[in-house]
Image (cartoon, grey):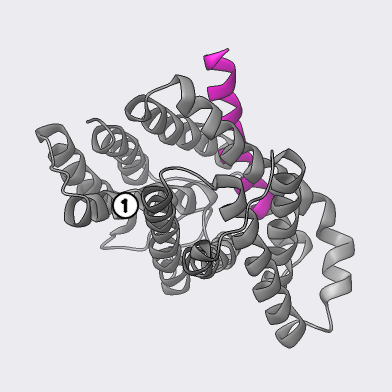
């Protein structure tokens, strides 16, 4: 049963990136609209599977912060996938796990062990192997552009801050209000992204909805499943085991899908960097 739940989380993590990549083809230049649809379907998933919603005014500041970070992460992920590699964008998402680690060090009085130090060093080496080139680097036949790199950095920061805000909320409420926090936050995300789409993409909103609602629904289901089944896994699997398995498993699956489905060409150095990235995240999560 534990293995089955773990597989659901890994597959959900990878497939949501695949669906976002496919959405870029169907709904080009409608990034806010795509983000709105994905967030709306994720919200619907949480409402359907929630065991009850309990609103507390003290949740509001955490929900606002999370909503802003989540909205930025959703849109920048779509933008990065539109102009760059699926595998390398997903790797940047995994790199963002280092941000909550830094938060825990400075604000939760946690300490690093030697394995985690090695993991941080490997992450730095992985970054150099993956993204630095003296000559033109190719991902999917194209070099890594400055535009993709800027989107990827914003994705790195915003996704990492999502984890930080969630941990702050859990610490403040003793782990309570998980569904309520997510539902309130996602309502804000939908409103924020919908407003943005109506301002900047109003001429193509309906067209994007007709073309992308189904894939957005699948993406929302994957995102909701990832969060829902992750909570179930953490009840029976230690976090120090669950998070490394999730990160490593989803990265390997995404790497395979990027090559087989999207015919991305990953250079030898990037493949080494990818492998080091997987190893670094495993080490960083070992406590």
Question: Where does the image place residue 217, in percent across and percent down from the top left?
Answer: 78, 49
Question: Where does the image place residue 240, in percent across and percent down from the top left?
Answer: 32, 29
Residue lying at the far left of the rendered structure: 114
Task: State left or right for residue 125 relative to residue 35.
Answer: left
The quadrant in which the C terminus is found is top left
How many marks do you count on the picture? 1
Eyeballing the image, is 199 above or below 257? below
Question: Where does the image place residue 221, in percent across and percent down from the top left?
Answer: 72, 43
Eyeballing the image, is 222 above or below 127? above
Q: Residue at x 37, y 55 (%)?
A: 168
Q: Residue at x 76, y 51 (%)?
A: 44
Residue lying at the far bottom of the rendered structure: 199
Mark 1 residue element: helix
Residue lying at the far top of the rendered structure: 1
Residue bearing the label numbered 1: 100
Task: State left or right for residue 213 relative to residue 153.
Answer: right
The image quarter containing residue 56 is bottom right
The answer to if 11 sits in the magenta stretch is yes
The answer to if 79 sits in the magenta stretch is no
Q: Residue at x 88, y 72 (%)?
A: 206
Question: Where does the image place residue 215, in percent across and percent down from the top left?
Answer: 78, 50
The quadrant in which the N terminus is found is top right
Question: From which residue to which does the magenta span run?
Answer: 1-21
């Amino acid at each position: 049963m534990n293995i089955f739940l773990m597989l659901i989380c890994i597959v959900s993590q990878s497939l949501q990136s695949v669906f976002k990549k496919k959405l870029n083809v169907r709904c080009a230049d409608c990034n806010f609209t795509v983000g709105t649809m994905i967030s709306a379907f994720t919200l619907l998933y949480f409402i359907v599977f929630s065991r009850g919603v309990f609103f507390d005014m003290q949740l509001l500041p955490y929900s606002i912060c999370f909503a802003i970070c989540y909205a930025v992460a959703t849109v920048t992920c779509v933008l990065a996938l539109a102009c760059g590699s699926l595998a390398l964008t997903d790797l940047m998402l995994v790199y963002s796990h280092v941000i909550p680690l830094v938060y825990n060090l400075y604000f939760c009085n946690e300490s690093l062990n030697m394995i985690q130090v090695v993991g941080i060093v490997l992450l730095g080496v992985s970054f150099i192997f993956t993204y630095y080139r003296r000559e033109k680097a190719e991902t999917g036949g194209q070099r890594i552009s400055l535009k993709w790199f800027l989107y990827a950095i914003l994705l790195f920061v915003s996704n990492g801050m999502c984890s930080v805000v969630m941990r702050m909320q859990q610490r403040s409420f003793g782990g309570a209000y998980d569904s309520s926090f997510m539902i309130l936050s996602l309502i804000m995300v939908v409103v924020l992204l919908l407003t943005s789409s109506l301002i900047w993409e109003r001429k193509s909103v309906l067209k994007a909805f007709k073309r992308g609602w189904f894939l957005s629904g699948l993406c929302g289901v994957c995102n909701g499943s990832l969060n829902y089944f992750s909570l179930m896994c953490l009840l029976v699997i230690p976090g120090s085991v669950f998070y490394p398995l999730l990160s490593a498993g989803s990265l390997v699956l995404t790497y395979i899908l990027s090559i087989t489905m999207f015919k991305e060409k990953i250079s030898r150095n990037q493949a080494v960097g990818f492998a080091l990235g997987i190893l670094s995240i495993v080490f960083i999560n070992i406590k």
